[in-house]
Image (cartoon, coloured by chain):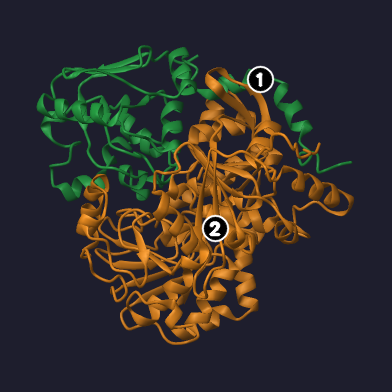
Chain colours: A orange, B green
Amino acid sequence: MCYPSDPMSGRSLLDKVWDAHSVRELPGGQTQLFIGLHLIHEVTSPQAFDSLREMGLRARFPGRTFATVDHIVPTHTRKRPLADDLAEQMLQALERNTSESGIRFFDDASGRQGIVHVIGPELGLTQPGMTIACGDSHTSTHGAFGALAFGIGTSQVRDVLATQCLTMARPKVRRIEVGGKLASGVYAKDVILAIIRRLGVNGGIGFAYEYAGAVLESMSIEERLTVCNMSIEGGARCGYVNPDDATYDYLRGREFSPRGAAWDRAVAWWRSIASDPNAAYANRVTLEGGAIAPSVTFGINPGQNVAVDERLPRLEDVSPDSRASLEEAYAFMALRPGAPIAGTPIDVAFIGSCTNGRISDLREAARVARTGRVAHGVRALVVPGSRAVAREAEEEGLPEVFRAAGFEWREPGCSMCLAMNPDKLVGREMCASSSNRNFKGRQGSPTGRTLLMSPAMVAAAALRGVVADVREVL
Amino acid sequence: MEARISRVAGTACVLRGDDIDTDRIIPARYLRAVTFEGLGEHAFEDDRKQAKGDHPLDVRRFRGASILVVGRNFGCGSSREHAPQALMRRGFRAFVGASFAEIFFGNCTALGLPCVTLAHGDLVRLMDSVELDPAQEVAVDLAARTVTCRAGSFPASVPDGARGQLLEGSWNATSVLLEAGDAIESTARRLPYVNGFAG
């Protein structure tokens, strides 16, 4: 079934995909929405399986759920049993639950393990026009393909296992157009940081973000994944980019992509679900891509960010209602209003995560790493997003580049993005990080501090020992 | 059918600040578990340690509170249901704030915990009133869409869908979703990708 453009009333991708997946309308304006792809991991699923068993239910569409292990895996060794007994229990629970339910589990032995939001796309599981759910807020990542992808809690993981459906309220759609062209040294990470800075960390509540404009159109799929990944950091329920030829080129030949005659039918359907040119939106926001600079967070939420050559905002520069959180941020980060962010000393550099742990991220970081050595006293980690990313990097000789520069090359996983494994900040350490959250305590030390930036910027900070402008390095 | 939730009344605790994320509500190290048991004692653990006994969850005047009054974008960040689970296991039964992050809101609804929002001025009045007299009863009335304290009865907003689920006792969505029966399979059959784009 295709959706011809209606010249009278255009529809957005969200409307088309939503309507196609609507099982029925529920009271109060909610929809029972069919979920085409369900991804699970070890942290948010064990209680869902327990609850399913307590209700006497089984997975209804086990073939539409796929599992991996990413949050708790150590990155220095994968020896079983895992040294952390709690982590080992979680992994065993996932092994048991997936095997009992007939769900495919991409574990280490499969050669396909990795961060759930990295492997979905690279396996071709993530496709345009799908509804996708995962018990992880960064599920918004998958929107890069023109899918509606929702982060959910554990009770909802149970809902999806039991019924392959969710109870959802239809979000409004905000179209965010980034025009022009990015300057050299400016990356997808800087684009999404600029969007969140402009719209705020709560500006997206009630919305899906549709990213568009020349900058998004010229981005690779991996770059679009970075942008969509942090939709949740802007408060949006999900974020997406309309599918185009770049999307289809990326998907062609992947393990779970359609083949042969089915491929042509798939592309025709995928084209038909893109937003119509005359689609109606709740509102529109435009940004000029050429004005975006390499960005760095300085506070305790991702909206608190500045261009690397900018000075930190003074308390009197911001609106009264954000002054208290700015004061809290400066107190926690031990940074001074009005000071430059460039030159801020760092202790740790982390390159990886579902935001920036893909091969193109590692290539950009390696370009910088080739220009020098990690500064004395800086601990620098490179954690590939998946086994496949690690393999590709190895074929290109990237581990050697990183090691020669003084970085550690690790096994794939979420690692120091949220530090549920042994990779943690210690005490007040300051970390230049390519991850997605600079929340208090996020990287494993309650008083540890995070500066979010692009992977190339993290590499530059690692070499200089301080926050540095990657444009001066490249 | 679960319990119908139309009104939550009790003493309240005021937790000021915007954009309080779920990593702060329950640090990730406590997610290393296969159950939600014991999470209550670790709610806001790092913030509480840094506040040295002066955190709203620790001060004597808010002890025993069942309603948590918060600012804007409460529960942002990670989708971890461990966050509302920890607060629920600490005794909170309802949340009143300026706004809630959507995944947190959905998780709360799935646990039968109402999240309602007040207009800015009303929220300030509620917070001030509760701080002045923490022993007073605060009532979150979903049926009437109000939050009532000594300072007055304020109109509260809550999305119709979640409100209906709580009022009707259908907040455990699984049972409601199951009622769709074969309509689930027939929706799946209409989706071209579910059958591999067969011609």
Residue B106 lies, with reference to residue A129, above or below; the image says above
Which residue is at 60% across, 59% downward?
A: A216
> Where does the image place residue A230, in percent across and percent down from the top left?
48, 53
Q: Give the residue type at disc 2.
A: Val
Quadrant in the picture for residue B41: top left
Location of the N terminus of chain A by quadrant is top right
Q: CA distance from mark 2 to mark 1?
A: 41 Å
Residue hosting label 1:
B180
> Where does the image place residue B66, in percent across and percent down from the top left?
25, 24
Chain of the residue under the numbered disc 2 shown in the image: A
Q: Give the residue type at disc 1.
A: Ala
SS assignment at label 2: strand
> Where does the image place residue A77, in percent across and percent down from the top left?
49, 67
Residue B168 lies, with reference to residue B102, above or below; the image says above
Residue A87 lies, with reference to residue B66, above or below; the image says below
Which residue is at 13% across, 43% downward?
A: B53
SS assignment at label 1: loop
Residue B9 lies, with reference to residue A347, above or below; the image says above
Residue B88 shown left or right of residue A334 in the figure: right
Viewer-proximal residue among A35 and A114: A35
> Where does the image place residue A168, in percent across and percent down from the top left?
55, 30
Res A79 visible: no
Viewer-proximal residue among A242 and A387: A242
Circle 1 Cα neighbour tier, 10 Å, few/some/many (<14 / 14–19 / ≥20): some
Chain of the residue under the numbered disc 1 shown in the image: B
> Tag on residue A178?
2
Quadrant in the picture for residue A173: top right
Which residue is at 61% across, 29% downward?
A: A162
Res A98 visible: yes
Q: Judge if badges 2 and 1 mark residues of a common chain.
A: no
